[in-house]
Image (cartoon, rainbow, N blue to C red):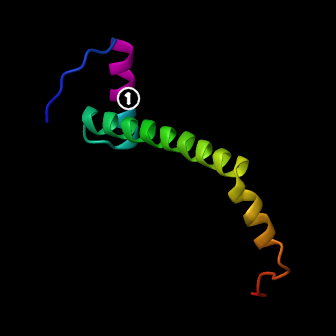
Amino acid sequence: MKVSVSLPSDDISFVDDYARRRGNASRSSVLHQAIELLRLSEMEQSYSDAWDEWADGDDAKLWERTAADGITDAPR
């Protein structure tokens, strides 16, 4: 799919320079990488929110009782 975007010339220069330094084939590939990083940053926040929700809930208390049952990791 083709999409047209308007960017300031400084941003275009940065994308071109980045592509050249990193060996990217095109501006599109640089923008695709940037979008992937944005997705990952949102996923990181989602994981953090889920962990906080779990830690604040009853499941964390149940897990602590289970994990403290005296069994340790096997020697490696």
51 in magenta = no
Question: Which quarter of the picture shows residue 70?
Answer: bottom right
Counting from the top left corner in percent of width and height, residue 61 is at 77, 59
Tell me if residue 46 comes above or below residue 2 in the rendering.
Answer: below
Q: Secondary structure at mark 1?
A: helix
Main SS, magenta residues: helix
The magenta span reads: 9-16
Q: Nearer the viewer, residue 32 or 65?
A: 65
Question: Which quarter of the picture shows residue 76?
Answer: bottom right
Counting from the top left corner in percent of width and height, residue 46 is at 53, 42
* Residue ID for mark 1: 17
At x 76%, y 72%, the residue is 66
Q: Amino acid at mark 1?
A: Asp
Q: Which residue is the extreme one toward the bottom?
A: 75
Residue 2 placement, left or right of 52: left
Q: Nearer the viewer, residue 71 or 2?
A: 71
Counting from the top left corner in percent of width and height, residue 44 is at 55, 44
